[in-house]
Amino acid sequence: MSSNDDQIAQVEHHFGIRFPQDYRDFLGTTGSLSQFVPPADDFLVIDALDELIGNNEAGEFQKRFPGAVVIGGDGSRELLAYDFRQNPPPLVTLDVSSEDWSSAIHQATSLAALLKHFPQTGWKWDEADPSPS
């Protein structure tokens, strides 16, 4: 097991979850993302693995959104999170000022499905094989 795999396992253990495989693959290759994504030039942030625990604790997301693990956002008010109340956990968007799950917007079923809409990120994969290429 690589040190990156060990770090992923430690973060998963902290939250008591197992990340979806496409996100684990992303963490093992690209690791993080912070860029404007055409055509609308939306800003997309996917946090580095070593930031996940601190970012989630700082925002008290576990208290407000039990079962959520925030992995990024738009660099402002919208947070990108996995909803581990469901299996498999979908990605959702949460407003940073929301008090609970009532305002969650389900975006995509997986990180691969989300990033498929943003080929400019450089994250590419074969549809037959969902692992990154």
Image (cartoon, rainbow, N blue to C red):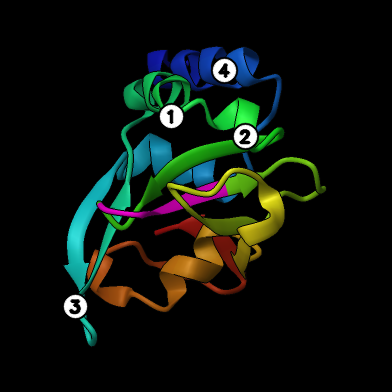
Identified by mark 1, the residue type is Gly
Q: Nearer the viewer, mark 3 or mark 2?
A: 2
Discs 1, 3 touching: Cβ within 8 Å: no
Residue identified by numbered label 2 = 64
Discs 3, 2 touching: Cβ within 8 Å: no
Query: Helix, strand, or loop for circle 3?
Result: loop
Residue identified by numbered label 3 = 41
Q: Left of 130 or right of it: where is 41?
A: left
Identified by mark 3, the residue type is Asp
Q: Decide which of 15, 21 is in the foreground and name it.
A: 15
Residue identified by numbered label 4 = 9
> Is tag 3's residue or tag 2's residue first in the polypeptide sequence?
3
Q: Nearer the viewer, mark 2 or mark 4?
A: 2
* Residue depicted at x 70% and y 33%: 66
Question: Where does the magenta region start and end?
Answer: 76-81
Discs 1, 2 touching: Cβ within 8 Å: yes
Identified by mark 4, the residue type is Ala
- Name the outermost residue toward the bottom: 39
* Residue depicted at x 72% and y 40%: 84
Task: Give the quadrant of residue 102.
Answer: bottom right
Few, some or many C-alpha atoms within 10 Å of disc 4 (few <14, some 14-19, many ≥20)? some
Query: Helix, strand, or loop for circle 1?
Result: loop
Mark 3 → mark 2, Cα distance in angstroms: 30 Å
